[in-house]
Image (cartoon, rainbow, N blue to C red):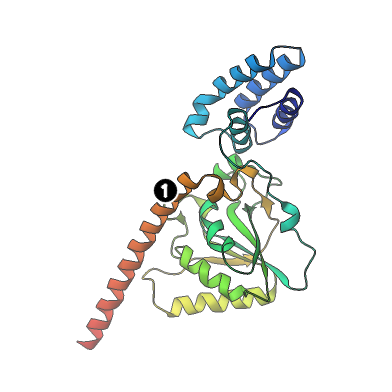
Amino acid sequence: MKMNHEETLNDLYNLILNPGTRKWERSLLSSAKNSLEDGANFDTHLAKLEADLRPLALRGTLTPDVTDFYRKITGTNIDTVQFDLTKHYTNDLTYQDSAVFAGGCFWCMVEPFETLKGIVSVLSGYTGGDVDNPTYDQVSGRHTGHVEAVEIIFDTRIIKYEDLLELYWQLTDPTDEFGQFQDRGSQYRPIIFVRNEKQQTIAEKSKQRLVKSDKYKKPIVTLIQPTTEFWPAENYHQQFYKKNPGNYKKIERARQQLMAYQRLENNIRNELKRFTKKS
């Protein structure tokens, strides 16, 4: 992708002001911005900036928005269009409702819901914490009390809240309060956030059915608690499965393998219990 001078300066300016940009990244971006404003050769300094960012880019450890910028200046084939928040925050409340679920890395929580019929929008974000406008680094560092979560807008004429809960239980390990599968840490704990008494009642009944099903040997620890402010994650994280299909498939495959192993364990346990009863 061919970058122009004005567009690049605007991107650099926004990244420098972005609270999620790390100090080391900001120093490189500021140096490049100052040089370009002083009339330095555009192509030369953009190439220098790319080379400076490359080591962390190759390891996948640049902050999300700087990652988007790096892929933009290198012409990497990736959708860097901003997530359409106007579609998500709709005013059509007659036939629409929202659900908020935390169940491990939000990268793996979007596709299963977004591909259901009746889903209007799925937004990755942070909730349940006590810091305004948290960044990915802050949440990953467990400095804010937030969990990674998805906020789902759905059409109640097509799909019900109960249906979303049923899928949620299939995607998560409700016995693990310290994370989900390969995702470890308090930011990955499973929580159902309810926005009113109706959702609270439906979620509690759904959880009780799971408890009575005797599907799991360990106690069901998934929390059900009122919604708090939902902060959208950086654009890099939105619809990750579409932007980074290769990485997403690897992560999802590992998650599916762990879930399959868990299901096998539970099935064997239940079969042994039935055999013992017959004996």
Image coordinates for residue 123, horizontal then vertical, percent:
64, 55
In this view, the residue farthest toward the bottom is 278
Q: Residue at 39% of width from left, 77% of height from top?
A: 214
Image coordinates for residue 63, horizontal then vertical, percent:
59, 35
Image coordinates for residue 3, horizontal then vertical, percent:
68, 27
In this view, the residue farthest toward the left is 279
Residue under circle 1? 250
In this view, the residue farthest toward the front is 2
Image coordinates for residue 222, horizontal then vertical, percent:
51, 65
Q: Label 1 sits on what residue type? A: Lys
Asked whether, in this view, residue 172 is left or right of residue 161, the answer is left
Whether residue 214 is visible, yes or no, is yes
Count of all numbered marks drawn on residues in the image: 1
Q: Residue at 62% of width from left, 28% of height from top?
A: 73
- In this view, the residue in front, 87 or 149, is 87
Asked whether, in this view, residue 242 is left or right of residue 88, the answer is left
Asked whether, in this view, residue 13 is left or right of residue 125, the answer is right
Disc 1 secondary structure class = helix
In the rendered image, the vertical position of residue 112 relative to residue 204, given as above or below = above
Q: Quadrant of the N terminus?
A: top right
Q: Quadrant of the C terminus?
A: bottom left
- In this view, the residue in front, 226 or 82, is 82
Q: Quadrant of residue 74?
A: top right
